[in-house]
Every structure is written in C-alpha cells, then in structure tokens.
Amino acid sequence: MASDRRDIHNSDVPVLCRSCEARHRGMCGVLDPEQLVELARTTHKARHQPGTELIGDSTEIHSYANVMRGVVKLSKVLEDGRQQLVGLQFAPDFLGRLFGQESSVTAEAASSVDLCVVPKSTLEQLVEKNPALEHKLMQQTLRELDEARTWMVTLGRKTALEKVASFLHLIATHTDPEADVVVGGARFELPLSRLDIADFLGLTIETVSRQMTKLRQMGVIQVTNNRTVDVPDLDRLQTLCG
Amino acid sequence: MASDRRDIHNSDVPVLCRSCEARHRGMCGVLDPEQLVELARTTHKARHQPGTELIGDSTEIHSYANVMRGVVKLSKVLEDGRQQLVGLQFAPDFLGRLFGQESSVTAEAASSVDLCVVPKSTLEQLVEKNPALEHKLMQQTLRELDEARTWMVTLGRKTALEKVASFLHLIATHTDPEADVVVGGARFELPLSRLDIADFLGLTIETVSRQMTKLRQMGVIQVTNNRTVDVPDLDRLQTLCG
DNA sequence: CGCACCCTTGAGGGGACTCAAAAGAAGTGG
DNA sequence: CCACTTCTTTTGAGTCCCCTCAAGGGTGCG
C-alpha cells in the first residue's frame, strides 16, 4: 500500500510511533510526520497493572492518552457505592474528556494496559492547528455515543440472560480474534472479572454467574479457567441477545 | 450587551434567524453573518405535532436540524418491540448523526416541535470550511455522551423510585423554569407521557405511576392534570435520586 | 351522554437480589 | 510438592421488587 511504502522511506517517523496501532487506525493517523515528531517529543509510554486507576472521577485533567494495548474500563459510582461501568476502551481508542476541566468518569485498567500519554496542552494546541485531528476525535466520540446508546437498551430492556449474552457478543466482536478461530465461532479471554461484568450489566455477580452456567448448559459457550470463553456459533449467541 | 447591539445594526442577519435560540446558544452562534446568510438560504422551518417521527432508525440521512422549540425523544427498539429512550433533546440542540450514512436511532417529536432543517450537504460543506462549527458540534456531542453515561447509571443501578425521582429532577433542571418559581423549587410540564417515561427509565407504565403516587404521598411533588408537576423542594427530590 | 385514551390501583407471580456456604483457582512458604 | 491462606466463582435457599394481567377512575371530545 502507498502509505506503507511512504513509511518505509520516511525515517522521520519517531521510533516510539513505528509499531503503534494508534498511528494507523487511531488519532495519530491524521498527523503528518512533522506533527508526529512534534507530538512524540512530549509523549511517553506507560504500562499499568490491572486495577490501576488511570483517571479519577471529578479529578482535574492534565493529560490525555491513547490506549496502545489492553482494555480500559470507564465507570461511575453512586454515593452509596453502587457502581456502573459506562464504557470499555480498546486499542487504539483515545482516552480522556477533550476540552473538559475535569473527568466525568473513572478510568481504570481492566487488563494490563499500555498507554501513550500526551500532555493536555500539547494535544489541545495540536487540535487547534489541525482540524483533521478534531475531526478524527469527533468520529470516535460519535462512535462512543452510539455504543453508549446501544448499551442503554441492554441496561434498560433486556433480561439477565440477554445481558450476559450481549456482553459476550460485544467482547467476541471487539477483541482481535485468535489465530485458531473456527468459522462462525470465536475464542477469547474475558478482560473483566465477574464483578466487573456485573457492574457493566447492572446485575449482581451471582446472577452473572448463574447466566453463564445456563449458557454453558445450553451449549452456547464453553468456559475454561473462568476466563477463556469458546463460542462455537456466534449467530446462535446473537439470537440470545434480544 | 455587545452582541445585542451588534445584532441591531446588523441587518444582514437573516429574518428567520433573528429570534432563533440556536443562533445564540446553539451551533449557529459560531457563524459570522455571511455564513449565516449562506446557511439560511437552504434551511427551512418545520413544525411537527407530538408523535411525529422525525428520523427513522436505520434510514438514510438527508438532512440535519436544530431544535428551536419543544422536546425531541431519541429511541431504539428491539426486534420484539421492547423500546428504550436513549436521549432527550431540547432547544437549541442539534439533531442528527453528523457524518453518518444512516441514523442509529429513531427521533420523534415528544411535544409540539419547531425545527430548522438543514440539508446534509450544506452543513457538511460548512463544517469543512469552518472548524469552529465542528468544534461547537463536538462540544454538544461530548455533552450528550456525558448525559448518556450518567443515564446508564440510572438504568443499571437505581431503584424504580430513584429512577422516577431522577427523571423529574432531569426535567426540572432542563426546561426553562416558569416565572412563578419559588426559591429552591420548580414547577413544570412533563414533556413525556407515562409510557415515554417508562421507556426512558426501563420500567413499565404501572411502576412509573406507582412511584409517582408514592412521591406524591411523601409530599415531594404535587401533580395536577397528570402533566403539571410542582416540586416545592428540589434538594429533597435530589436526595431521592440515589 | 358515550366513547376513547391515558392514568391509577389492585392482586398475584416471577426474575433478580440477598444472604450464606461450598468449590475452585492462585499465590505463599515450608 | 503439598499444606495453607486468600480471592474468585459457583451453587443454594429464601425474599423482595418490579412485572403481568385485570379492573377501575379521569379527562377530553364528538
């Protein structure tokens, strides 16, 4: 492809960026090499363990980030501790509330996560200079809004079984399929614990577990080590999503 | 105010736009008079009765619109007919999925609604020429995303009483308060029927009704004609939102 | 008045929650 | 390698909240 050829000859591309997914599919894809160099001067990679809080709700924002690897969960909590996940972000998603003074959600590493961290001011200056960048971020924001609204239907109108099926379907279609996929099926690692899944679905951990058992007994899924899920027939799973 | 004075002298402002809220608080606020004239050449006002479908789910998009008056409800339905409202839009909100080929939601007039309709191509050309316009629309999209996520907590984690209280609080704080507001209280017309409220909250119509009755018995609200709600103490209402 | 529509109220049932305990899985140290 | 702890997940029993089904008001309009 043309862009690949250009990359080969373009030794200006910062080393950090060369193997980064965000440069192709993510926001950095709209930057020219010069802007990429400028951006890379102020960014740094950061690896986080599962459970690490990346951004706190109602805390001031000093930086944005790109998810380079792993899964980040976005959540909100009520005063009495009830928690609800409001989004999941995969590579190469952009992380942070653009133009916001403070975050409206808590961001936490669900798995081991690699981030490319950008200072707030750097990115905002770049956005001002490059309308294409804001356009790219707008596209992601619109996609996130679509996903949030799709999920509202799940939260408000689906049964527990349908919720769990919907979650499995979401993960199956959002994580890169492993090499040994069977046609029409999928095998993947759950990036979330049962508690996280419950918080994502508006259920309790016990109910999630019971529905997983039911799906297992129905032959829709196979589970090994509580985390690896095998879906022989994705269409079958989809019919259970309501 | 300075902007008012400028308006008076600026007879270039199209007649249609002079009394429009969207020109000040909405997206047209970032346009200069020349652009406003250009835009106004292709727009037209449209009044719709309650219940009119403005945009169908999965239908092709030919135009966008600004809500000038009234309330628009956004909804999604499952194949078996279960419905979920995923958003409410008030003046001067922008209506439509920017850059999308087809809508991902159904938009319906909840009350009598006045729209300012803009052809898709006109607006998209204007967005390309004017980064400030995309920025403004980005701001609204980000706000809608925040609202959607806040509502996900309500859908997933709140009890029926908390849901109804949250809905009333939302309406109380999103519709322009009437002249005769008491300090700390509010009085407003519900823009939605009980069925719509139920679809918004992920409840049944009967449950909504029962919780309204309970709130009435608790003295938190007074209801007249099933549509006019009086909240003597908004703080009291808020404590019930969970 | 009579009809239509929307809302409220009541009785009963079921699905998800709560509380409790057992079974696995993962890590620690002898 | 195995006892031990700890954490996660599963399973079970019982309860409650919300849904379902059904009937009874209100309100507006012809």
Image: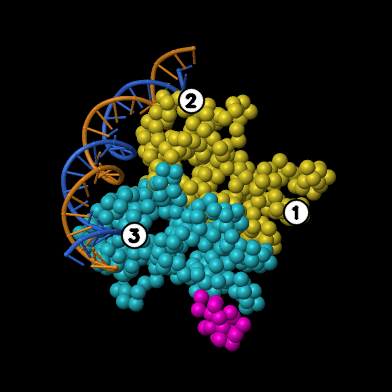
Chain colours: A yellow, B cyan, C blue, D orange
Q: Nearer the viewer, mark 1 or mark 2?
A: 2
Residue B191, given in percent of the width and then of the height, sits at 37, 64
Of badges 2 and 3, nearer the viewer stands 3
Q: Measured from the top left, where is residue A228 in percent x and y?
A: 51, 28
- Binning the other alpha carbons within 10 Å of mark 2 as few (below 14), some (14 to 19) or many (20 upward) gives some
CB contact under 8 Å: marks 1 and 2: no
**Amino acid under disc 3:** Ser
Residue at the image position 53 percent from the left and 80 percent from the top: B18
Q: Secondary structure at mark 1?
A: loop
Q: Residue at x 51, y 39 (%)?
A: A170
- The residue lying toward the viewer, choosing from B109 and A62, is B109
Which residue is under mark 3? Answer: B193
Residue A104 in view: no
Where, quadrant-wise, is the C terminus of chain A in this rendering? top left
Can residue B89 be seen here? The reply is: yes
The residue closer to the viewer here, B154 or D18, is D18
Q: Amino acid at mark 1?
A: Asp
